[in-house]
Amino acid sequence: MTSILNVENLVKRFGGLIATDHVSLEVKTGEIHALIGPNGAGKSTLINQLCGELTSDSGHIQLGGRDISHDSPEDRVHLGLGRTFQITSLLEDFTVRQNVGIAVQARDGGNLRIWDRVTKRRALWDEADARIADSGLASRADTLVADLSHGEKKQLELVMALAGKPRLLLLDEPMAGLGHAESQEMIGLLDSLRGHVSMLLVEHDMDAVFALADRISVLVYGQILMTGTADQIRNDPRVREAYLGGEDELC
């Protein structure tokens, strides 16, 4: 299996603190790869380095075999890197349909005046409607984002990220703030994407991680402790120690 993401010896320092300490990581094409670790392990720093929001002090990032270590965040998006956020970033005063339409238009370039001459933008709206229907938000297409539940906003953000047609999708705690039913719905939605888009999943919900991940990497104190299957991670004593012996978290 080929790799969509290769990270080699990535380092980020903040003064005397080494947030990511020679991190090496591989995400295979088509897999769901989870990144877990205690609070303060460096997960957010690593994701921001991958996206280009933070400049690495050393190391290399390859996306689909191309070195993107020095590319801008915008260039990384155009090369196929998508992202969702722990805290949703949506246009609250616009409808679900309008938000998705903007995401489609942003992918295709040009201005964002998507309400001008709508008849000439029929393909844009058709794609937006199809993506909404596939997500299960069809009945909410004309609802203002401000009126959506937290879980629905998470779904919408995922739909918008997928509208960019990413080759690799970085998911930053998609289960954060969701109730049990909403989490199960999100797990089902992500599972339905398996094989269609590669994913790097950063998540604290271990039930979701074990349900979804083909492989899991454990980040501790800025270093990758190990990478393995769910069973390997669940049963490794070093991982249990990293989680302070919290057996409930890893069961």
Image (tube, rainbow, N blue to C red):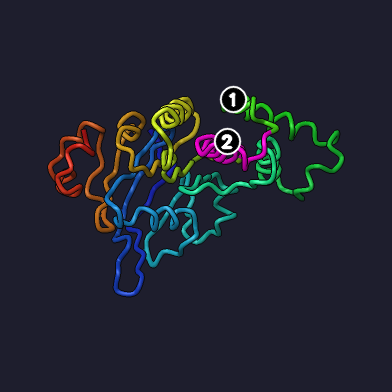
Q: Quadrant of residue 180?
A: top left
Give, as a three-letter code, the residue at label 2: Val
- Which corner quadrant holds the C terminus? top left
- Position of residue 3 in the picture relative to residue 107 (left or right): left
Q: Name the disc covering residue 159, or none.
A: 2
- Does the magenta-highlighted stretch encompass residue 198? no
Number of marks? 2
Q: Main secondary structure of the magenta part?
A: helix
Q: Position of residue 71 (x, y in %)?
A: 53, 59
Q: Position of residue 47 (x, y in %)?
A: 42, 53
Q: Quadrant of residue 171?
A: top left
Find the magenta span and give its range: 143-163
Give the residue at x 45% y 36%: 198
Question: Looking at the image, can residue 152 be seen?
Answer: yes
Give the residue at x 42% y 29%: 187
Q: Mark 2: which secondary structure? A: helix
Going by the picture, which residue comes out furthest to the left?
237
Q: Position of residue 242 (x, y in %)?
A: 19, 49
Q: Quick one: 93 or 124, which is closer to the camera?
A: 93
Q: Which residue is mark 1?
A: 134
Q: Are marks 2 and 1 in contact (CB under 8 Å)?
A: yes
Give the residue at x 39% y 67%: 57
- Does the magenta-highlighted stretch encompass residue 147? yes
> Badge 2 local density, few (<14 within 10 Å), some, or many (20+)?
many
Real-space CA distance between mark 2 and mark 1, rounded to the nearest whole angstrom: 9 Å
Q: Residue 238, relative to residue 18: is it above or below?
A: above
Q: Mark 1: which secondary structure? A: helix
Q: Name the disc covering residue 234, or none.
A: none
